[in-house]
Image (spheres, rainbow, N blue to C red):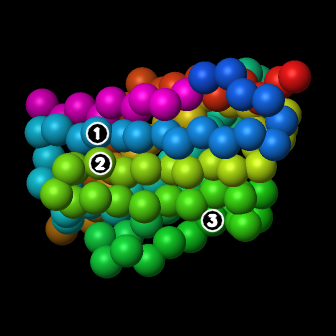
């Protein structure tokens, strides 16, 4: 059974930092592209950052220069380092694992971790 367990969310003041972690189990982690997405109530879930199996990264414009995604295949874990946080970063952050297969794609989601940026 595939499980993605996020951790590291919480309350932080504007300008502060948080590091989110997502530990995967039940999958061969190294063959999955990993990503972080976020969602606020009433809005669609949006992409924050992705990292490929080879380590290439991609960021939403809102995250560029402030967030860093990384992965540790030995620990089956993906991270999101978030610096200089802003109130508009407040959201539930979700971890995603995805890969292409012959007949389509596989995609798995974690339960999410709340990030609140407020003074």
User: Gap in Å between the C-alphas at discs 3 and 1?
Assistant: 20 Å
> In the picture, which quadrant includes the C terminus?
top right
> Residue 56 location, x and y as percent?
44, 77
> Residue 4 location, x and y as percent?
30, 35
Residue under numbered circle 1: 23
Element class at badge 2: strand
Q: Earlier in the sequence, mark 3 or mark 1?
A: 1
Q: Earlier in the sequence, mark 2 or mark 1?
A: 1
Which residue is at 12% across, 54% downward? 28
Residue under numbered circle 2: 77
Q: Nearer the viewer, mark 3 or mark 1?
A: 1
Element class at badge 1: strand
Question: Does residue 45 lie above or below 52 as drawn?
Answer: above
User: Gap in Å between the C-alphas at discs 2 and 1?
Assistant: 4 Å
Q: Is residue 118 rendered to the left or right of residue 99?
A: right
Residue 2 within the segment the image draws in magenta: yes
Q: For label 1, count other residues whose C-alpha is less than 10 Å away and answer few (under 14), some (14-19) or many (20+).
A: some
Range of residues picked out in magenta? 1-9
Question: Does residue 105 lie above or below 89 as drawn?
Answer: below
| Residue 66 appears in view | yes
Residue 102 within the segment the image draws in magenta: no
Residue under numbered circle 3: 59
Name the quadrant containing residue 66. bottom right
Q: Residue 16 versus residue 91: which sits nearer the camera?
A: 16
Which residue is at 28% across, 39% downward? 23
């Amino acid at each position: 059974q595939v499980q993605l367990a996020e951790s590291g969310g919480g309350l932080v003041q504007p300008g502060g930092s948080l590091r989110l972690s997502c530990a995967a189990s039940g999958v061969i982690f190294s063959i999955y592209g990993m990503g972080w997405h976020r969602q606020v109530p009433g809005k669609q879930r949006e992409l924050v950052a992705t990292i490929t199996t080879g380590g290439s990264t991609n960021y939403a414009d809102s995250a560029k220069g402030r967030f860093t995604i990384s992965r540790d295949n030995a620990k089956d874990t993906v991270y999101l380092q978030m610096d200089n946080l802003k109130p508009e970063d407040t959201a539930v952050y979700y971890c995603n694992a995805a890969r292409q297969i012959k007949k389509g794609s596989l995609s798995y989601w974690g339960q999410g971790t709340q990030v609140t940026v407020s003074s």
